[in-house]
Amino acid sequence: MQKQRKKEDKSMTKKELALEIIRRLKEEYPQTDCTLEYNEAWKLLVSVRLAAQCTDARVNVVVQDLYAKFPTLESLAQAPVEEIEAIVKPCGLGHSKARDISACMKVLLEQYEGRVPDQMDALLALPGVGRKSANLVLGDVFGKPAIVTDTHCIRLVNRMGLVDGIKEPGKVEKELWKLIPPEEGNDFCHRLVDHGRAVCTARTRPYCEKCCLADICRKTGVEE
C-alpha cells in the first residue's frame, strides 16, 4: 500500500497536488478565518506585530488591555511608547513592538488620515510591517490575493511536498504563487494554520493517521 501511495504521489504535478490539498482542506475546515481578533484594520496591524514569537491567544488578551487605555488610532499614536510597552510586555519583545506600533500609528495618522493603505508597497513602508503582515492585511481586510507564510504555512507546505526544503518566508511565498490560485491563497493559508494546530503539529509528531491528506502528502510519517 505504501509503495502504491508513493507511485501515486509521483504521478501528480505540484500544481495538481496543490489543488487537491486545497479541495480537501476546504472539506475538513469549511469555516476558516484569522485567529487574531480585530474589528478595525489598524487593530489587525497592531495584533500581527504583537504576534511575532507570541501566540494569537495571548495577543487577543493583551490587546483588550491596550484598547481599554487607548481605544482609538489617534490615542494610540499619541501614547508614550513606555506606556504601550508596559501593556504589551507579556507578548515578548515589548520595547521593539511598542516602538513599531507607535511609529506605525503615527504614519497612518499623518500620511493616510488614519486609514490603512491597501497596496503592498505602502504597507511594507509602515514601521514593523513585513510581507507576512502585509499579506494578512491585504487578504483579510481588503479581500485581495494574499499568501501568508507564517510558521504553520512553511512547515506544512514543506512536509506536503509543495516546496522542497525552503524555509525562508519570501522564497516560500514566491513558490506558492506558482501553485495556488490567487483567489484561494488567503483562505488556504488560514486552513494551513487550522491543520497545523490540529493535526500536522510542530511540537509533537504529526498525527498522520488522522490526516485528510495522508495518502497524497509526500512526507507522511517522515521525521524532520
Image (cartoon, grey):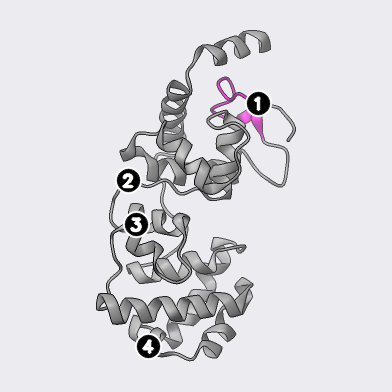
Q: Earlier in the sequence, mark 1 or mark 2?
A: 2
Task: Give the amino acid at mark 4.
Answer: Ser
Quarter of the figure with residue 141:
bottom left
Task: Give the amino acid at mark 2.
Answer: Pro
Q: CA distance from mark 2 to mark 4?
A: 32 Å
Q: CA distance from mark 1 to mark 4?
A: 50 Å
Q: Which element is circle 4 on?
A: helix
Mark 3 crowd level (few <14, some 14–19, many ≥20, 10 Å Cα) = some
| Residue on which the image places disc 2 | 145
Q: Earlier in the sequence, mark 3 or mark 2?
A: 3
Q: CA distance from mark 1 to mark 3?
A: 36 Å
Q: Earlier in the sequence, mark 1 or mark 4?
A: 4
Task: Give the amino acid at mark 3.
Answer: Met
Q: Which residues are magenta?
A: 207-220
| Residue on which the image places disc 3 | 120
Task: Give the amino acid at mark 1.
Answer: Thr
Q: Which mark is residue 220?
A: 1
Asked if marks 1 and 2 touch (Cβ < 8 Å), the reply is no
Quarter of the figure with residue 3:
top right
Asked if marks 3 and 2 touch (Cβ < 8 Å), the reply is no
Give the residue displayed 43% in from the left and 55% down from the top: 34
Give the residue displayed 36% in from the left and 63% down from the top: 123
Give the residue displayed 38% in from the left and 78% down from the top: 105
